[in-house]
Image (tube, grey):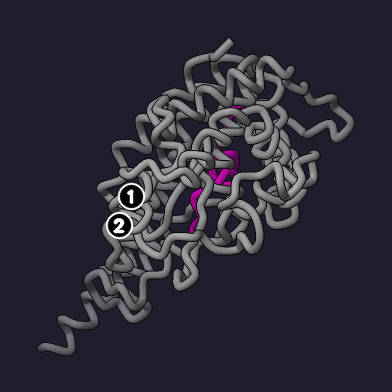
Amino acid sequence: MNRLIRFSYKKFSAFLGLTLLISFYACKPSTPTPPVDIDEDIYQPSDAELQAIGMQIFQNETGGNKDHLVFWNANEPFPSLGLGHFLWFPMDYKTEFGQASFPPLIEYYKKHGYTESQLPKLLQGDTQFAPWSTREEMYVQLNAKEPEIMELRDFLYNTFPIQVNFIFERLNNSLSKMLIVASDRDHLKAQYHRMANSPSGYYPLIDYVNFKGEGLSGDDLFTPLTYIIDILGDKGESAYNPKRARVYQGYGWGLRQVLMEMQGSERGQAALDEFSRSAGLVLTRRVENALLEGKDESIFLAGWLNRTKTYAHPLF
């Protein structure tokens, strides 16, 4: 009798998985994205537009507070600096989510005319790792208004244009990288062009690539089949199993995933609205998938979603 029950459960699990999969694809939009003209000109934002974008990123990351240009979130193991809250890892920090973004910014300053002596003292010499080992150490210096850390904060406040250009250059370099790993190159390029050629479309692109990266790792299209396998098991076994569920790592949350989730072709406000919804979906899915691996990131989600809502509002 027990064997019969187990056999019936396996058949039911397989039937349930197949039903969910068919239902998902039956509900997906079937309108194909128009073919991409690879020679199509892409609008390039003006300096004034880039600075407006930079000020919005400054607002997103710091609340427009100069004091938060040198910042260490109590829920993170590393400090964030500059208008884009570029990450600077302590020496003993190990990460699975990519490289720190602040050391490349320091090199970008040097590449664009800043000599070693023109940089703040904390940015001279070996800058691979942050000069503070702990959050407490950094805030002791900030609260005491020690000259070196105040010099760093003021330097970052007075050099917003170069920081915005640094992020914009990252975006410009991102398309070719994303296309290499995209599951549908024409679709990704079409959605990128759609956003870039929409008024204010560069703000979501620039902010998101700085916020969550290019999304070069993992899949760029979510399929419920992965969830079905993780939930039911490959032998019809039940329950979530963090050791089996690799969706968190298997599905990314960067710009590539956001663009690939978009289905429309209309530019302008329709494109901004869809990017905003797609970004919210991708980040919500990240939090849900993280739970399958025993990681609770829900504390961040409300702030992330508030940020993605700004993408639907034109800056200029």
Taking 166 as reference, is 312 left or right? left
Taking 287 as reference, is 213 left or right? right
Residue span colored magenta? 251-264
Tell which residue pokes out farthest to the top in this image.
316
- Disc 1 versus disc 2: distance between alpha carbons? 5 Å
**Labelled disc at residue 278:** none
Query: Are the two marked residues, 1 and 2, in contact with CB atoms closer than 8 angstroms?
Result: yes
Name the residue carrying label 1: 139
Name which quarter of the figure residue 209 lies in: top right
Q: Could one spot residue 250 in this view of the protein?
A: no
Tell which residue pokes out farthest to the right in this image.
39
Q: Residue at x 54, y 14 (%)?
A: 315
Residue 58 location, x and y as percent? 49, 29
Considering only vertical position in the picture, is 7 above or below 126?
Answer: below
Name the residue carrying label 2: 136
Assess whether residue 271 is covered by the magenta stretch: no
Residue 132 location, x and y as percent? 43, 60
Q: Residues within 10 Å of mark 1 (few under 14, many from 20)?
A: some
Q: Residue at x 58, y 35 (%)?
A: 155
Q: Could one spot residue 195 in this view of the protein?
A: yes
- Element marked by disc 1: helix
Q: Residue at x 73, y 52 (%)?
A: 177
Nearer-the-camera pick, 230 or 152: 152
Tell which residue pokes out farthest to the front in this image.
147
Nearer-the-camera pick, 175 or 116: 116
Considering only vertical position in the picture, is 14 above or below 26?
Answer: below
Residue 298 location, x and y as percent? 27, 49
